[in-house]
Amino acid sequence: MKLLSVNVAKPRPSPWGDVKLTGIDKRPVGAPVMVTAPAAKGTGTVGLAGDRVYDVRHHGGPDQAVYAYAREDLDFWEAELNRPLSNGVFGENLTTAGVDLGGALIGERWRLGPDAILEVCCPRIPCGTFQGWLEQAGWIKRFTQAARSGAYLRVIQAGEIRADDPVEIVHRPGHHVTVAVVFRALTLEPDLLPGLLVADALPEETKELARRRTAHLPRRIRLTGPTRNTCIAAVPTRNTCSAAVPTRNTCSAAVTSADVSVRLQPGQVRRTAVPGLGYSSLSKVMGSERMRRPVAW
């Protein structure tokens, strides 16, 4: 595992939003580059000397000090887009080789060069500038669906870094929350958010989002019906759910209220939904009734 290149922004006009300049166009540099912890978000400062961001509302600060993207993922996109992609073209500060960025744990620490230590913090969420820069219609959706996000890192210990420095993992936390899991939680699978709270190294705003989700985390209830029929269905507080349940069939879902028992009446079918959790219902298939399971996070 190593750094293929260290990339610093070449400021250029940005016609893709209200901010007039962008630092997304990053170019490899040959000399060593000092990496230090930047000032608070909103100042435009980042980790690498000579680099900066211009959309200070959404970029920069300690939790986005350094952005890493894998050469292997750039190669994937070269084939997908049928165009060459040079190191730094995705706006990354570090182009890596042999590093599984999606599988990196939040809070994992890397040593780069003799002194610098960086900590994996969060994934990159694509923005309109990224789409405009690549001149790809629908790029935000395409990038999100591919889930090859790269990783932001914070600076734990300052030091000089350069191309060809090895990437040494010096610490791995005792949880299983990876960059890829956080990316899915923040984009297409928000029901994963409560499970992120075990990762202390996440940015505070991400943890707060997960806490809000956890505050409404459903509890299980058991719904009973005729003749050994049971159904654990998704129902909001104080609401009721009725469904027609065939003998011995079961389904599982989550609820937001305390445990409740509800008598299910044959012949009644109601689809009960909880935002983000999917639904539990019955459907007739080939003359028989079949349970449909809810989406689980």
Image (cartoon, helix red, strand yellow):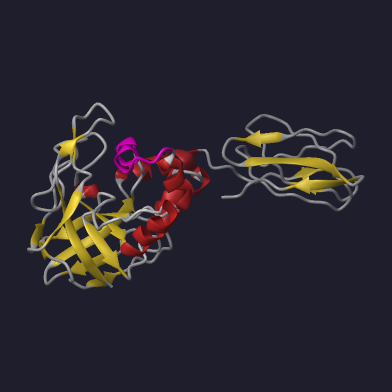
Q: Position of residue 140 (x, y in %)?
A: 41, 41
Asked if residue 91 lies in the magenta stretch, the reply is no
Front residue of this view, candidates 122 and 27: 27
Of helix, strand and loop, which mostly describes the magenta segment?
Answer: helix
* 183 in relation to 116, above or below: above
- Figure quadrant of residue 78: bottom left
- Figure quadrant of residue 164: bottom left
* 116 in relation to 217, above or below: below
Residue in the picture at 24% in, 26% down: 18
Total numbered circles: 0
Residue in the picture at 25% in, 49% down: 91
Query: Quick one: which residue is furthest to the top in this view?
Result: 18
Front residue of this view, candidates 43 and 31: 31
The reply to whether residue 248 is in sight is: yes
Q: Which residues are magenta?
A: 128-137
Q: Is residue 102 left or right of residue 36?
A: right
Q: Is residue 148 left or right of residue 112?
A: right
Q: Position of residue 42 (x, y in %)?
A: 18, 36
Residue in the picture at 28% in, 31% down: 16
- Figure quadrant of residue 219: top right
* 54 in relation to 230, above or below: above
Q: Quadrant of the N terminus?
A: bottom left
Front residue of this view, candidates 145 and 175: 145
Q: Position of residue 62 (x, y in %)?
A: 20, 48
Q: Position of residue 55 (x, y in %)?
A: 22, 35
The reply to whether residue 105 is in sight is: no
* 222 in relation to 268, above or below: below
Residue in the picture at 47% in, 40% down: 213
